[in-house]
Image (tube, rainbow, N blue to C red):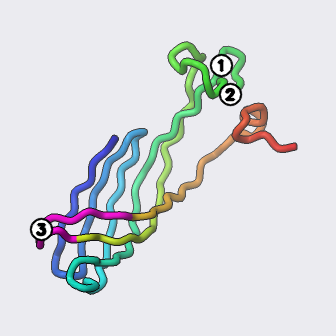
Amino acid sequence: MGGRVSYNFDGHNAAEFSIANPFSLSANYAYNFSAIRGKWAPYVTAGIGGARREIALDNNNQPAQLNSNLMETGPDRSQTVFTGNFGGGLKYFFTGRFALRFDVRDQVGHYQANVQQCRRSPRWHRN
């Protein structure tokens, strides 16, 4: 769940602010290219923000099983990091003020992972 608000300075330049769960907060600049056939408008975006990630551990300080109830696990470890993001997409305008947006974005951040703790987790396992 989350939300995003955008403000268009003119036909090409916009600022966006978003919040999502698990906790992620970002501010973006978006450049809107000229509309194609008056309805389709491609755009690119990039921004900065912060995110908080939780790592659930069982009572033996090992990664919790992916199908376990996280409320029954041991102490959680969390990290808050500075992030950057970038992406692009396409807007389809139904009217001058109402559009549907399709986009692809990537968020990058440097998380300090303890491989020793995560090595038994299926997501980190290597043969």
Tell me the SS state at disc 2.
loop
> Which stretch appears magenta?
93-102
Q: Earlier in the sequence, mark 3 or mark 1?
A: 1
Answer above or below: position of 7 versus 114.
below
**How far from the left and from the top, in percent, is residue 3?**
27, 48
Q: Height in image: 105 above or below 12?
A: above
**Which residue carries the number 2 mark?**
63
Q: Nearer the viewer, mark 3 or mark 2?
A: 3
Give the camera-side residue of 89 and 111.
89
Q: Quadrant of the C terminus?
A: top right
Q: Residue furthest left?
A: 96
Name the N-terminal-most of marks 3 and 2.
2
> In the shown orientation, is residue 48 left or right of residue 13?
right
Q: Alpha carbon of mark 3 to alpha carbon of mark 2: how far?
A: 47 Å
Q: Nearer the viewer, residue 43 or 13?
A: 43
Which amino acid, mark 1?
Answer: Asp
User: Is disc 3 in contact with disc 2, using a CB cutoff of under 8 Å?
Assistant: no
Label 3: how many Cα within 10 Å (few below 14, some 14–19, many 20+): few
Contact (Cβ within 8 Å) of mark 1 with mark 2: yes
Q: Amino acid at mark 3?
A: Arg
Q: Residue at x 24, y 85 (%)?
A: 37
What residue is at 28 percent from the left and 85 percent from the top?
36
Q: Determine whether the residue tagged by mark 3 lies in a helix, strand or loop.
A: loop
Q: Is residue 72 left or right of residue 17?
A: right
Q: Which residue is mark 3?
A: 97
